[in-house]
Amino acid sequence: MFPLPQLDESSEEPIYRQLHEFIKQQILNGSLAPGQKIPPTRELAGQLGLNRATVAAAYEILESEGLVRGHVGRGSFVSGGQAHTGIAWEERFVPAARAEAPAPGGTPGISFASARPAQELFPIEEFRAACDEVIRGEDAAGILQLGSPFGYAPLRAWLLEQARSSGVAREGDDLLITNGCQQALDLLQRLLTQTGDTVLLEDPVFPGLKNLFASAGVRTVGVPVEPEGIDVEMAARLMAREKPRVLVVTPNFQNPTGATMGLTARQALLRAAREAGVVVVENDIYGELRYEGTGAASMKQLDETGDVVQLKSFSKLAFPGLRVGWAVGPRSAIARLAELKQLADLHSDQLSQAVLLRFAQTGRLESHRRRMLEAGAERLHAVIAACEKHLPPGSRFTRPQGGMNLWVRLPEPLDASELLSKAQAAGVSYLPGRYFAVSRHVPGSLRLSFAGLRPEAIEAGLAALGRVFTEELERARAARSAGLAPAIV
Amino acid sequence: MFPLPQLDESSEEPIYRQLHEFIKQQILNGSLAPGQKIPPTRELAGQLGLNRATVAAAYEILESEGLVRGHVGRGSFVSGGQAHTGIAWEERFVPAARAEAPAPGGTPGISFASARPAQELFPIEEFRAACDEVIRGEDAAGILQLGSPFGYAPLRAWLLEQARSSGVAREGDDLLITNGCQQALDLLQRLLTQTGDTVLLEDPVFPGLKNLFASAGVRTVGVPVEPEGIDVEMAARLMAREKPRVLVVTPNFQNPTGATMGLTARQALLRAAREAGVVVVENDIYGELRYEGTGAASMKQLDETGDVVQLKSFSKLAFPGLRVGWAVGPRSAIARLAELKQLADLHSDQLSQAVLLRFAQTGRLESHRRRMLEAGAERLHAVIAACEKHLPPGSRFTRPQGGMNLWVRLPEPLDASELLSKAQAAGVSYLPGRYFAVSRHVPGSLRLSFAGLRPEAIEAGLAALGRVFTEELERARAARSAGLAPAIV
């Protein structure tokens, strides 16, 4: 944070001198650190209600004193302090859009904040058995040796066979193992987009996806997600108008909304993408987690061109701490992704690949999945019932049939960001909608990740949230009806 | 490969028509695939000895027929065949310098081609024990759950404590766990360089490093590596002249040369980098593998500014199939690297991190290191003795005191690339110098990676190589003394 001065217009000291003196003191007392960026003149002038030339004059004196250094195209930086023998690191970082991202890791109390599987459901004994079998197996030394960028060969062969027999992989397709879906998205970003390109994303979408493209200087355009998934007509219009290079879509239990696309919508979206010549990346990380109803075929299965790239992962079903996902797509694209994978980190960890293969081949994964589906169904019913019971009137929420998340819109004027600290004080956390916004932000929106919580915790958490939201809503309405400005919450 | 036509200048058919007809047939018979790039007019004109306008005329007709499509800034591509319903993938890939890289994985026979530890020395029983202890431990469920981008907290704390107590990490330093050193280099590339920037690398250097920067559009400038390591005076001159953003240096047992820098050279290089304001990345992946003699302190230990970023890994010492390395550097840089790490793949695999921590904390890593050093010393002596015995007169080679590689220069006119197929026919492989060249290439150079081979295999392999090289040298000299042009080998 750049500190703002109190400037005195009635003083005899000119404003630019006051500003100069203030910033100088901040540098000398260490509030502004060596290498720290100072705001552009235009920005600071706007914040202080000053003429830009006034700010520029203050900066010029600072520069003449050696306290601030300008750097063409990267702005101005504090050069004072002990930095004269070292690197001013902030100056060295490539400028990149750094979007706000939620802090990783858990939060105390009842947390609806993280889309992770329930840890208490981890089949630890089954995992241990698979691990034992692998480390006592004949291939142990081979697993510990350097491997292939395409992935551990037996796992890759097994996954490809699965993909072929289910109609996901065609003749011309190949498969690359990645460190979860996130790395597949990162490699695709590098292969298919560069600074100034445009991609189409669902809006809202999980921060790891939009920030990935934004940090590479790629423009992200959002397509609204409705309870039935991405708005296909809007997607078609945006593909024609914005000429995106890639569309990333999560047809099953989208993160954060939980929305799922029907068969007709999937087919229409594929048609629109084909007409516009846009590469479709299908993020199917939640596809195995359907708790009720029946789903449509995946985009990759429906695709007649063979051009869809489908991403999957063990992370949401089994053990996210083991970083194993995969991408299925046209052979030429997979070959290039493997080259980038090798430059990125040589290959994925082989111990986890071997253990997950064993876990899957011995039927343990399928047994675990059945238990996860039972537990997921319970939790889904619990969260929907609790939303109905506790959210204030006027709230809306999605009703997914699987996955880990649902999406809430609180009635106006509630702002989920502003209410978060009150919720946390009541022992409950969630992620406000602003982390997920691509092109539009609805202040009342928030994500509830329910899959990691027991039904009792879901009920208790939503009861607490309901109290916080309802109380705030009543206060705002009382204030409004009394003719006062709405309370700042 | 783009096929070249036989054009008939004596024909009545104009040359541009002949060329058009030839390319059209190639497209229609499938020799040129949909999406394949066709050479720029300038290039094809040069190859065929034609006027550029002639080639352009042929392309224009192909384009009017819909067989070829131009793409601003990306060149022209075959659009025919069945591609009209799909994506022409080659058109979609971001243009990037794709340097030639050796195929990953082993080669049959006696292979000096891969810098990997000896698999038969893997302490499999010790590894199993560490693995058992981890999966039966209290934290098993936590290890399987989503983790932190900084790495598995207990491993990170342990590594940081080691780095602090050895004087590697200072007050202002922090540590990030990566998927081996390669990922640390990739993240640093993204953080510190962008298209058009320059980096200084050792020349020769391992392909994974130079290709990483080249693929991001970063210019790589090589500093010659002598047997005593990087040429410091040249490095200083190049830093002043080329204004690189980063210098990557491997002071211990550099890959591919095995060269090691002395204390004075390290200090001089640090001084030069500090004066030029260049970020120094110290790749210390081989630092633990000293078989004889005594080494100097690391650059990070010697650095007085605290700005050096040091990379280390378990891969060369223990199990490269487990992808665990780490970076130590200034806190602000590590924090930004962790943000990029999270976008790249969320975090490193936690099972391997936990097992390697256990392996290290229980003293098993140190016992294994001692065995590796004994075996390494034997292998080092074997490779040096075998080089002395078998390489043809006039050959030079480095004499490292550790690591995995040494560097050979064969006498002229031998070309290590051209001789490789003969060597392979004799059952031995190596990597020719061209894979490692940054700014200059010496045709007679090659890398011998000896650490993965038993002394008997080293002796047998070099005996076979010596026969191939000596025979070729004698043939070339006989041809030259007979007044003939040197044989094409």
Image (spheres, coloured by chain):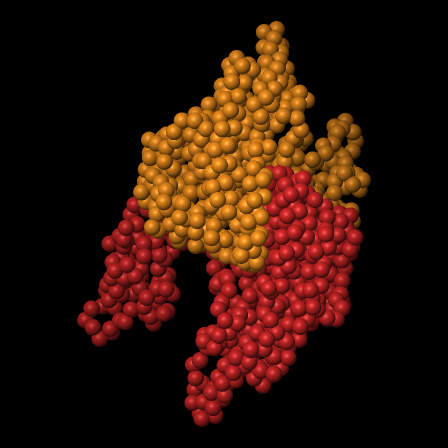
Chain colours: A red, B orange
B26 relative position to A4: left or right: right
Q: Is residue B366 above or below residue A363?
A: above
- Total numbered circles: 0
- The outermost residue toward the top is B482
B436 relative position to B8: left or right: left
B443 relative position to B282: left or right: right
Q: In x, y percent, where is residue A166?
A: 78, 55
Nearer to the camera, B173 or B99 = B173
Q: Is residue A117 above or below residue B79?
A: below
A202 relative position to B265: left or right: right
The answer to whether any part of residue B97 appears in the image is: no
Q: Is residue B96 above or below residue A434?
A: above
- The outermost residue toward the left is A12
- Quick one: quadrant of the C terminus of chain B? top right
The answer to whether any part of residue B6 appears in the image is: yes
Q: Residue at x 73, y 65 (%)?
A: A266
Q: Residue at x 19, y 71 (%)?
A: A12
Q: Residue at x 52, y 28 (%)?
A: B375
Q: Residue at x 40, y 41 (%)?
A: B280
Nearer to the camera, A381 or B17 = A381
Q: Quadrant of residue B410?
A: top right
Q: In x, y percent, where is residue B202?
A: 46, 33
